[in-house]
Image (cartoon, rainbow, N blue to C red):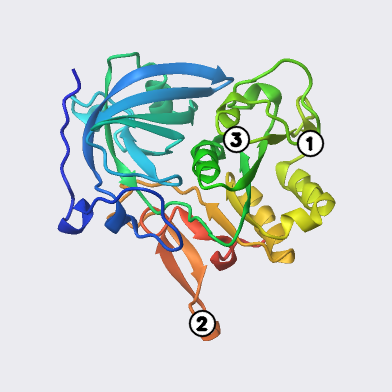
Amino acid sequence: MLHNRARSFSGDDVVVCGGMVSGAYDASQGSSKGLFLAQVVGNESVCREHWRCVLEVVGLGDALPGQFVQLLCADPSADCWTSPAPLRRPFSIAGLRREGKRCEVDILYRAIGSGTRWLATRRPGDAVSIIGPLGQPFRLLDDRPVAYLVGGGVGLPPLIWLAQWLREAGKETVAFCGARTADRLPLSRDRAGPIPPDKPALAFREFSASATPVVLSTDDGSLGARGQIPDVFARYLERHGDRARPAVVYACGPEPMLQAVARICSRRALPCQVSLERMMACGMGTCQSCVVRLRGATAGDGWRYRLCCTDGPVFDASQVLWEAG
């Protein structure tokens, strides 16, 4: 049996709302974050180095695509400071299903360090300590009927849930997914045979569930188009200029990829929201370790620091001060 050990972190954290949001959203006013003892429902390998873990949680507050949870990758009943991974790790929510107070949370992750390798050894019934939901989600734009999702590698998880959210809102949605090689693509094939390059197809189960076609690329051309996903995305926009004009772009992945997507969107005057990756020790703004440089509110303001964990991880791409490159 799963025992709920929730607690709030401040009086402002316990306001609960339901449904979707439009425009700006303040997570501190939209969900009740807490500490929970979750139970592993399933944990399986999906490709080379990548795993999908399903956690059952009781009492988790309302969450939206783009938000994340902090997992303790160690036995929650032991002294975490003696474990090889004493600090919590942030994981995007790849999916969430509710039934009463219980919900299942999907975590799609790459097992490459001591913490994620520990997580890959968890079996159904094991306990995992989590904090969440945390962070600011993606925003629904009412005046944009078309949505393009651009992700690479471990940037794909939040876009899987986002695709469902957008489809439910009636948006025409296409996902652009990239990986280094076919055996490092953390998606499940929905059909056999070749994947058409540069053409949307219902070929992957995670996105087919929301009727979202995928344009796929791999760096080595082992599946889908050859090349990096920003280049494939740019070619698609060139071929679909009129259809792309009313679109909004949502992106998550390595920062060089996000920077390239932001430039493409800037040239075409497309609004773009990016989910940034940062090392997070606490996930709640306490340690101040996950800073992001944003443009000032006015031209004379220069720039300012914001925290990826509380002000993000989702930001307006036009406001991010990207590293030179």
Q: Is residue 84 visible?
A: yes
Q: Which residue is mark 1?
A: 199
Q: Which residue is mark 2?
A: 298
Report the quarter where the N terminus lies: top left
The amino acid pointed to by label 3 is Gly
| Number of the front mark, 1 or 2 | 1
Asked which secondary structure carries label 2, the reply is: loop
Outermost right residue: 239
Q: Position of residue 290 (x, y in %)?
A: 41, 54
Q: Position of residue 111 (x, y in %)?
A: 48, 25
Residue 74 lies in quadrant? top left
| Number of the front mark, 1 or 3 | 1
Indicate which disc, 1 or 2, sits on the residue closer to the N terminus. Answer: 1
Residue 123 lies in quadrant? top left
Report the quarter where the C terminus lies: bottom right
Res 153 label: 3
Indicate which disc, 1 or 3, sits on the residue closer to the N terminus. Answer: 3
Q: In the drawing, does residue 166 fall left or right of residue 271?
A: left
